[in-house]
Image (cartoon, rainbow, N blue to C red):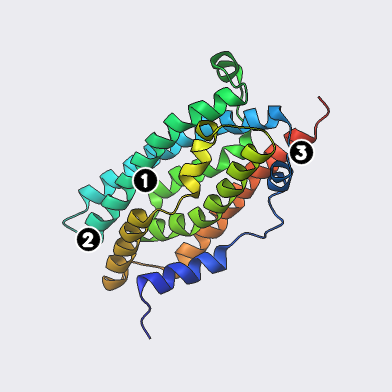
């Protein structure tokens, strides 16, 4: 039986869902126990992640546009990646208010050395941008975003409840926590086009997704370790 793009996305998201206990930092933030310096490090790490991911998404969009004549899935993939790149630009702007709220000023940003384990995620996204099949990457990223959106919803709520942050300072996390029906439609169109032309490899998607989730877990664990250090 041939599966639809929605069925494949839902099953992939379910298979790749992270262990709910894997993110040790999230419960600390959720109950207001994470240190402000850790919240600042989160902002500073995200500066690097967003910049890298936006370039990766633009490269994927360019790859899609260049291959439009060779692949029926390419135009649909291009629309998805272009929207992701636009979203990263919005996220970059919203991150500023959060960074200010946690005291991550320009001097601190200039002096900050990113943690290697926090930057494995964008490094792998860049690898996918260079090497992954377009429809497979669409499916992989879409499955990963489900977990990321849930994390952001929890953090946004905790920042308001426990840290007294205003809405503007929570805007970065609100942005990713909110449903994105247009992005989902573009993802489904790209995956369906890939399915229709035999350009989706579930084995590759599972491998990509497993690694991507592992690298995201490293991101949160590195910040959790930072929080545990004695000031």
Q: Which residue is mark 3?
A: 33
Residue that numbered label 1 is attached to: 84
Depth order, front residue of 180/8: 180
> What secondary structure is found at the residue carrying circle 3?
loop
Q: Left or right: 215 with respect to 135?
A: right
Of all residues, the one furthest to the top in this rendering is 107
Question: Of circles 1 and 3, which is in front?
Answer: 3
Q: In the image, is residue 55 above or below residue 190?
A: above
For the N terminus, the quadrant is bottom left
Q: Nearer the viewer's eye, disc 2 or disc 1?
A: 1
Question: Looking at this view, is 100 or 78 the one in front?
Answer: 100
Q: Residue at x 56, y 59 (%)?
A: 210
* Residue at 66 percent of width and 40 percent of height: 161
Callout 1–callout 3 Cβ contact below 8 Å: no
- Determine the CA span between mark 2 and mark 1: 20 Å
How would you rate the neighbour count of disc 1 (Cα within 10 Å): few for under 14, some for 14-19, many for 20 or more?
A: some
Nearer to the camera, 224 or 137:
224
Instruction: Pinpoint residue 151: horizontal percent, then vertical percent.
Output: 59, 49
- Helix, strand, or loop for circle 2? loop
Report how far apart the C-alphas of labels 1 and 3 lie in the structure: 32 Å
Q: Quadrant of residue 119?
A: top right
Task: Give how far across and how far down residue 73 sits, in percent.
Answer: 25, 61
Residue 175 point in image, percent of width and height: 46, 43
Mark toward the start of the polypeptide (1 vs 3)? 3
**Looking at this rendering, what residue extends furthest in the right direction?**
230
Between tags 3 and 2, which lies in front? Answer: 3
Residue corresponding to mark 2? 71
Near mark 2 (Cα within 10 A), the count class, few <14, some 14-19 or many ≥20, is: some
């Amino acid at each position: 039986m041939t599966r639809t793009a929605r069925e494949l996305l839902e099953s992939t998201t379910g298979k790749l869902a992270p262990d709910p206990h894997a993110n040790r930092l999230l419960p600390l933030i959720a109950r207001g126990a994470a240190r402000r310096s850790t919240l600042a490090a989160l902002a500073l790490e995200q500066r690097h992640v967003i910049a890298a991911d936006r370039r990766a998404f633009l490269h994927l969009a360019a790859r899609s546009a260049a291959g439009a004549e060779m692949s029926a899935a390419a135009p649909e993939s291009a629309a998805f990646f272009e929207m992701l790149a636009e979203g990263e630009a919005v996220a970059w702007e919203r991150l500023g208010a959060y960074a200010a709220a946690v005291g991550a000023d320009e001097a601190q940003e200039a002096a900050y050395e990113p943690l290697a384990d926090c930057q494995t995620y964008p490094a792998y996204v860049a690898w996918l941008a260079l090497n992954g099949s377009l429809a497979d990457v669409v499916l992989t990223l879409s499955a990963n975003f489900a977990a990321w959106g849930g994390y952001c919803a929890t953090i946004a709520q905790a920042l308001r409840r426990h840290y007294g942050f205003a809405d503007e300072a929570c805007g970065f996390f609100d942005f990713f926590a909110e449903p994105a029906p247009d992005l989902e439609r573009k993802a489904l169109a790209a995956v369906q086009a890939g399915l229709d032309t035999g350009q989706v490899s579930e084995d590759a998607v599972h491998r990509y997704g497993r690694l991507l989730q592992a690298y995201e877990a490293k991101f949160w664990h590195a910040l959790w370790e930072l929080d545990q250090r004695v000031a």
